[in-house]
Amino acid sequence: MFSFNSAATLHHVTHLPPSTTFARALECLHNHDLLIRLDPELAHYSTLPSPSSAPSTKRYKVTDSMHTLPAGLWDTTVTFEADITNTEDGIEWIIRAPLGLVQRTTWRVVKRESLGKEEDALVVNGEGEWSLVEDVEIKANRMLVGTVKGKCEENWRGVHGRFVGHLGEKA
């Protein structure tokens, strides 16, 4: 049977600067305000109550301005709910958007030496001991998956670059 639903996965790795410690990278990842503001399309966000079933998860209502979506898919602004849960090595971020879109992203701080040689060859910058590893899974209808995947691919280098820029700032 033909299905209109589809999925896509993405994997991005950025080496962190040599002066970056695990604790500092994790501190920045656990700063949800910082993470949400890394989004180049962010218009605004507000905090929602945490779900009673997961009190350690923080919930947000986020509005993005997205002027490059195909006509009729969404308005120029998209409002969605985002759940962010801190983990021992990063965060898990789940977005639930209109039209049934669910995007699950993990950002982890990992030792560079634990990356495989093929994966290490795909990184963007840096020579440090630690790497930021982002894994994304997008589930939605076929056309929406392609659009969201394209936006993720277009934006990740800038998002990771802005994250790296915050690592050197004072806490």
Image (cartoon, rainbow, N blue to C red):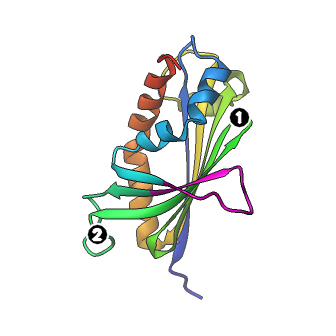
With respect to residue 15, does 73 lie above or below? below
Q: Residue furthest front?
A: 49
Task: Determine whether the residue tagged by mark 2 lies in a helix, strand or loop.
Answer: loop
For the point 54% across and 41% down, which residue is it?
32
- The quadrant in which residue 120 appears is top right
Image marks 1 and 2: residues in contact by CB distance under 8 Å: no
Q: Which mark is residue 112?
A: none
Front residue of 8/101: it is: 101
The amino acid type of the residue labelled 1 equals Asp
| Front one among 169 and 114 | 169
**Is residue 93 shown in magenta?**
no
Q: Which dot marks residue 75? A: 2
Q: Amino acid at mark 2?
A: Asp
Label number found at residue 89: 1
Identify the residue shown where x is 61% and y is 21%.
Answer: 24
Q: Which residues are magenta?
A: 47-61
Query: Which of 153/96 is in front?
Result: 96
Q: Is residue 137 visible to us here?
A: no
Q: As displayed, is residue 104 above or below residue 135?
A: below
Q: Residue furthest top?
A: 19
Residue 140 is situated, as x and y percent measured from the top left of the image, at 51, 70
Q: Quadrant of the N terminus?
A: bottom right
